[in-house]
Image: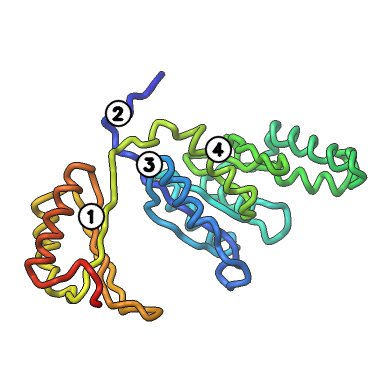
């Protein structure tokens, strides 16, 4: 059955990044900015992001809350087969289902082992202890579907609108793009949405705030933002004022806001 999504609201999209190495600073997260980039290219937006430790109980608590929503969620990290990789187990606990070896994942991991053996690295015999350990990376919560991994064939998994993928950016980012294009094309550019901004000089935020409040009353679907700068790196102090929302309403609100800025003494150009 084809579901008509033309009048349906776009689901919220969230990121969950899992790993002690991010929280300790040993690794810098690269998923947040990349997911924003991938979403923007498809006319979608990131709603929220959360960073979670490798502690299984922490991941379970996070996923119980997350599975209770209808959000589109990307989970990166912790799906390997070493003792610090607990995301697969936590997802199964959060859903109350058993773990099981996914047959397609088993096939793909076997193909990967054969490829490596052909290069003189390891064995194609899947009964060896090393390869049995590798098969643990294909043990997913019951009912999961695979997410293909173009980098090395070792798949991620999808269940209950959550996509689980490795922490390695070279793998995860292609898997994110595949998921957006394969599972969620109906939400691409679903809502006409733009964001406009301009810089204002010589104006305190307190003086323009009443106009910002009035703007959101006059254009209910438009959201404003105000990003002050104190003039870092030798620049002039300024405010970046902007609007975001439906194109026509955003254009009207933007022009109105520019006029309000000038009316209360702001400048659109930096001082000489």
Residue 219 visible in the displayed image: yes
Which residue lies at the image location 44% right of the left edge and 52% below the top edge? 36
Mark toward the start of the polypeptide (3 vs 2): 2
Point out which mark residue 116 bears.
none
- Residue at which label 1 appears: 243
Which residue lies at the image location 22% right of the left edge and 58% below the top edge? 224
Quadrant of res 191: top left
- Image marks 4 and 1: residues in contact by CB distance under 8 Å: no
> Disc 1 versus disc 3: distance between alpha carbons?
17 Å
- Residue at which label 2 appears: 6
Mark toward the start of the polypeptide (2 vs 1): 2
Question: Of discs 2 and 1, which sits in the foreground?
Answer: 1
- Image marks 3 and 2: residues in contact by CB distance under 8 Å: no
Relative to 175, 112 lies left or right: right
Q: Secondary structure at mark 2?
A: loop
Question: Of discs 4 and 3, which sits in the foreground?
Answer: 3
Relative to 47, 245 lies left or right: left
Which residue lies at the image location 39% right of the left edge and 20% below the top edge? 2
Quadrant of res 49: bottom left
> Disc 2 versus disc 1: distance between alpha carbons?
24 Å
Point out which mark residue 43 bears.
3
- Image marks 2 and 1: residues in contact by CB distance under 8 Å: no
> Disc 3 versus disc 2: distance between alpha carbons?
15 Å
Mark toward the start of the polypeptide (1 vs 3): 3
- Image marks 4 and 2: residues in contact by CB distance under 8 Å: no
> Disc 4 versus disc 3: distance between alpha carbons?
16 Å
Q: Residues within 10 Å of mark 3 (few under 14, many from 20)?
A: some
Please tell me which residue lies in front, 272 or 253. Answer: 272
Q: Residues within 10 Å of mark 2 (few under 14, many from 20)?
A: few
């Amino acid at each position: 059955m084809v579901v008509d999504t033309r009048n349906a609201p776009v689901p919220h999209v969230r990121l969950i990044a899992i790993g002690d190495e991010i929280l300790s600073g040993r690794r810098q997260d690269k998923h947040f900015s990349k997911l924003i980039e991938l979403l923007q290219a498809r006319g979608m937006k990131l709603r929220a992001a959360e960073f979670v430790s490798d502690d299984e109980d922490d991941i379970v608590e996070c996923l119980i809350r997350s599975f209770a929503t209808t959000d589109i969620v990307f989970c990166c990290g912790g799906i390997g087969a070493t003792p610090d990789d607990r995301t697969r187990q936590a997802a199964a606990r959060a859903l109350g289902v058993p773990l099981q070896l996914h047959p397609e994942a088993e096939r793909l991991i076997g193909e990967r082992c054969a490829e490596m053996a052909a290069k003189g690295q390891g064995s194609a015999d899947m009964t060896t202890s090393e390869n049995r350990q590798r098969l643990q990376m294909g043990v997913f919560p019951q009912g999961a579907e695979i997410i293909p991994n173009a980098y090395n064939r070792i798949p991620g998994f999808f269940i209950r609108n959550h996509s689980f993928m490795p922490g390695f950016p070279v793998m995860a980012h292609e898997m994110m793009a595949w998921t957006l294009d394969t599972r969620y094309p109906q939400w691409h550019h679903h809502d006409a949405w733009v964001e406009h901004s301009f810089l204002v000089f010589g104006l305190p935020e307190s003086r323009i705030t009443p106009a910002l409040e009035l703007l959101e009353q006059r254009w209910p679907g438009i959201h404003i933002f105000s990003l002050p700068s104190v003039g870092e790196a030798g620049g002039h102090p300024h405010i970046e004022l902007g609007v975001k929302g439906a194109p026509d309403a955003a254009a009207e609100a933007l022009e109105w806001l520019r006029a309000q800025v000038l009316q209360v003494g702001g400048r659109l150009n930096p001082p000489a």
